[in-house]
Image (cartoon, rainbow, N blue to C red):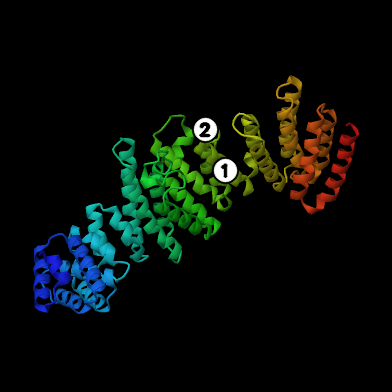
Amino acid sequence: MNAGRVLATSTSRNVVSEVTRDIVMRTSDMYELFELGRSVGLERQRNGSMEMLEAVVRACSDEQEHLAGALALAGGVFVATQNKHARRVCDALVRRQNGAGGPSMLRVWCELAPYIRLPNIHEVVAEAERMCDVSVLGNLAPFVSEQSVERVASAVHAASVDVLLRMEMGTASYEDAHRVVCAAAGVAQHLVDGTDRGLDRVWALVSDALASTHWASVCTSSDQIHGDVGRAGSEDYRRACTALVSYAQRQSSERADAMVNAVFALQPCLRYLPRSSVRVGRGREGAVLFYMDLLEHMAGQLATRTVNALVMPLAVRYVQSVERDWFESAHALILSVLDAGHAKVAVWYARVVLALYPQRINMDLLDISFTAAIRALAHSSSPELSQSCIDLLIARIDECAASGVERGVRRRELLCVLASQVASVPLDLLSFVMTSVDEHVDCEPLWATRRDVVGHVQDTVLESAELERRPVLASWVWRMRARVDARL
């Protein structure tokens, strides 16, 4: 009969005590002792022989020379049973323990940390750093003090950079990246529960750790990262991202702007990529993708200088990318920038989306993007720039008509986009846009196209228009429908 079986079944206190001391003395793998304690605890609890279980724990408490082993065994018993006596013994052994107890004890500390306060947690973290064990750092991160979490975040960030470099050399695995993501999620817990004071550096380090391993979240193989595939990433990744966004949105605009500048300093590729046409590795491209997604949520907090110098160059690089993820993220980022009132890019963006239609974007996306540009200009009191955008759209409609290309579907869709602008243009341009729509509808030879444009305005545009312009628009639509019906 092996020693573990004796501890789980013996009815003799003396035998249990002697075997406990012998196991603690002879076993060098602390996690093996922890697992033994857990299995013994569950077996004794199932049999109802808690008296013998307390004998095991008491023998651990009497141990003087092999404190780490005694703590590992008693800790396994406590985690399995939540026994109060085992808890007291563990607390006492932790106070007596000097140092981390060696590399094999690290996993035991991770198991005990959620239940027992660890006075030596900084020594444990130092041992994990020495062993480069990022999994242990992540498990312990939620339990270190706010004053010490930056040290853990720095170690996790260093591990992420190592994974990124090894990925570009072809030696990193998805499991390596996943371990870093789990560790980053542990550190990010402080961003949710913390006081927000002095955690900006932690935010930047966690952001860059996730960015450096984001290549693993955009994989397409169904057998990678334990089935958690696609840009949504694993549950740990989503939890960390939620913490980052939540923390950033709680800050003032000045502080959020400084945080973004800090992450651009951590990740040099964010600065050199927009100025270069060189194709870089998937790892760096993944980092840029992560930051475009993150900045989408922070555009409203950023200074104009930061948007123009740092954010927009990233979006410009990928706004016509053939890669779907980068293409979508770039456009989502630009829409957020426009929504935040940064109208400087509006005319340029109107040109871009018109050029991308219909090969890369459909009518709905064109409508959303073009309208966002017009609204940004309307809020910035730039009627002449709004006029320029409307002129671009009208020229595109006339181009289709003149050449006869896509006369049916494409012309109808472009006319609907033009009609949508009556809800967004500055009031000074409202009359011009309504007149332009009237002229194009009246000249349209296809009755179905005329009907669809009127229906689009009546069913969609009127609902989104401001109250002050709805009476004018309603009267206009009524007159236009009367003219269309008269030509049946």
Tally of numbered discs = 2
Q: Which residue is mark 1?
A: 332
Viewer can see residue 113: yes
In the rendered image, which quarter is residue 124 located in?
Answer: bottom left
Amino acid type, mark 2:
Ser
User: What residue is shown at x 66% (from left), y 39% (from top)?
Assistant: 364
User: What residue is shown at x 42% (from left), y 51% (from top)?
Assistant: 207
Which mark is on residue 308?
none
Question: Which of the image's four quarters has the N terminus?
Answer: bottom left
Residue 86 to residue 347: above or below: below
487 displayed left or right of 110: right
Question: Which of the image's four quarters has the C terminus?
Answer: top right
The local secondary structure at tag 1 comes to helix
Residue 24 to residue 267: above or below: below
Question: Which badge, 1 or 2, comes first in the chain's sequence?
Answer: 2
Q: Which residue is mark 2?
A: 321
Residue 332 to residue 125: above or below: above
User: Farthest residue toward the right?
Assistant: 486
Rendered location of residue 420, percent (x, y)? 74, 41
Q: Marks 1 and 2: CB-CB under 8 Å?
A: no
The local secondary structure at tag 2 comes to loop
